[in-house]
Amino acid sequence: MRTAFINQLCTLADTDEHIWLICGDLGYSVLEAFADRFPSRYLNAGVAEQNMTGVAAGLALVGKTVFTYSIANFPIMRCLEQIRNDVCYHNLNVKIVSVGGGLAYGSHGYTHHAVEDLAIMNALPNLIVAAPADPIEARAITTILASHQGPAYLRLGKAGEPVLHAAGTKVELGRAIQVADGSDVTIISIGGMLGTVLKASDELRLQGIHPRILSMPFLTPLDTAAILDAAEETGAILTVEEHGPGGIGTAVAETLAIHGHALAFHPLRLAKSPIKVSGTQEELRSAQGLSVEGIVQAAELLCRRPHSAVIR
């Protein structure tokens, strides 16, 4: 995803001289594509994320569209006050890009696990919150955010994520992408879990369960219409995310409650307290049920409990 992002940003910067990129002393072998082509619009702020965000806010105040870029929690947690007060409060044209969302930096331990970022960013004013599932979504969302006047948060995978959508798949601000149709259960995925969800979907269909699959690239603005359609047209809803409480599961539960839907629902997500804090991304996911087997089991349970709300 990060390669798709930087390639698309370079394409956009070719025709828009207002686009800038600032990094926090990383991105080597990735950001050179931008830095070499647009050296006057690229800054390395060093290991100083608060300063990076403040500089981005200043550039935005004079008409620039500024992308900040760093690993996992660093462009968010270390400079949350600057994002909140300097960027979001003033509705500035700063796009915060986090690479390695979820458990992508698994072996680095909890310091590098971005498992609260969606909840934190979703609480801030004026901020678009996006988490693409594959390179096609990443490219399209980069274009959307570059043209949007206002702040945004873009959560990317680390590298090597497969293309999951067909070429030409339409990605729109605040709209879900229906990947497959079904009537028994709707599985709503955000970010890098879509590939695992699709494998689980194949297993479920072999068992006679036909899931509707929705990729939800935007947590904010949220496609409430797609959620409500799923509540009306399928027997249950399962959300799947590489994130703890406060992400897509919480948003879907809130939407269902506000509109009075009491269908079977379950958020499959990371525990608030990490069960295992170091390992490969796959190991850490599987330890908390974010696997093909875990998704299949959760969907089967929901389909057996059509009139109960299951919220953990």
Image: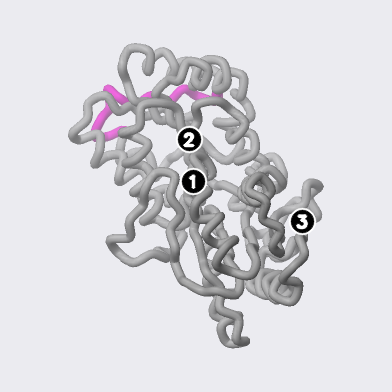
Asked if residue 150 is positioned above or below residue 58 in the image, the reply reads below
Calculate the distance from the C-alpha at mark 1 to the C-alpha at mark 3: 22 Å
State the residue position of label 2.
128
- Please indicate whether residue 213 sits to the left or right of residue 294 in the image: left
| Measured Cα–Cα span from mark 1 to mark 2 | 8 Å
Q: Secondary structure at mark 2?
A: strand
Which element is circle 3 on? loop
Residue found 54% across the figure and 44% down from its top:
219
Label 1 vs 3, first from the N-terminus: 1
N-terminal of the two: label 1 or label 2?
2
**Viewer-nearest of labels 3 and 2?**
3
- What residue sits right under mark 3 in the picture? 311
Rendered residue at 65%/66% (across/down)? 236
Q: Amino acid at mark 3?
A: Ile
Where disc 1 sits, the SS reads strand
Q: Residues within 10 Å of mark 2 (few under 14, many from 20)?
A: many
Instruction: Give the percent coordinates (x, y) of residue 113.
Output: 66, 45
Q: What residue span does the magenta drawing correspond to?
A: 35-49
Residue type (three-letter) at the residue carrying disc 2:
Ile
Where residue 231 appears, x then y in whole percent? Answer: 59, 61
Of 262 and 293, the residue lying toward us: 262
From the image, which quarter does the C terminus lie in? Answer: bottom right
Asked whether residue 156 is in view, the answer is no
* Tag 1 near tag 3, CB within 8 Å: no
Please give the residue where the numbered disc 1 appears in the rendered image.
218
Q: Residue 107 in the image: state x and y as whole percent.
A: 67, 52
